[in-house]
Image: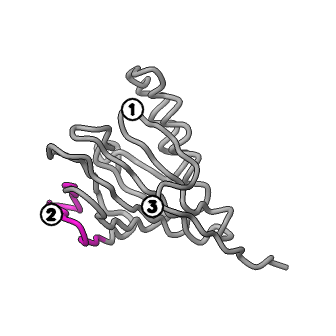
Amino acid sequence: MTLPVKEIILAPGEGNHLTMGNSEVIFKAVGADTHGHLGLFENLIQPGGTAPELHLHRQMEELFYVVEGEVEIQVGEKIVQGQPGAFILVPRNTPHTFANHGTKPAKLLIMFCPGGEREKYFEGLASLLKDGQKPDRAALLELMRRFDQEPVENVD
């Protein structure tokens, strides 16, 4: 028997905070909160901040909603200059990435469906980027593959 999902009520800035390089993620809802159906994270990206390499997910869709600032989002061959209110749905197996190339901080909501344990990828990444270090490539690839993320250059 599945227990009902319990409500989560968070004020602005509330949620578990995690620093990755010079960006910050705030977990609003993780897979454990939604029986794995979805995860919703707020990503605070500094100008030139930590950004993922071009990658794809085989088992989940990823959705982006720009709240503040400007975020450049690449989906397949398309590059979108996401302004506040912009929404992008990235289907499974679609290469994508995002970055803040502007001069002001940006805030991006990211949703993963299903959510699984996606927050553990971000926790692992924060550990690899700890103290400003450049992550070991083999360790980064292992982390990515464990949580349904594949760099595009290694995809068959």
* Residue 80 location (% of width, % of height): 15, 63
Where 106 sits versus 124, above or below?
A: below
Mark 3 element type = loop
Residue count near mark 1 (Cα–Cα under 10 Å), binned few <14, some 14–19, many ≥20: many
**Residue 61 lies in what quarter of the image?**
bottom left
Dot placed on the residue nearer the N-terminal end, 2 or 1: 1
The stretch in magenta equals 71-88
Which amino acid type is shown beneath numbered disc 3?
Answer: Arg
* Residue 42: image location, x then y, percent: 43, 56
Residue that label 3 marks: 58
Disc ID at residue 78 = 2
| Prevalent SS, magenta region | strand
Earlier residue among tags 2 and 3 = 3
Q: Is residue 34 left or right of residue 114?
A: right
**Residue for badge 1:** 21
- In this view of the protein, which residue sits in the foreground, 107 or 55? 107
Crowd band around label 3 with a 10 angstrom C-alpha radius: few (<14), some (14–19), many (20+): few
Q: Residue at x 36, y 63 (%)?
A: 93
Mark 2 is on which residue type? Lys
Q: Amino acid at mark 1?
A: Gly
Mark 3–mark 1 Cα distance, whole angstroms, equals 26 Å
Marks 2 and 1, how far apart at CA:
26 Å
Q: CA distance from mark 2 to mark 3?
A: 19 Å
Residue located 62% across and 63% down the image: 31
Residue 37: numbered disc: none
User: Where, quadrant-wise, is the N terminus in this rendering?
Assistant: bottom right
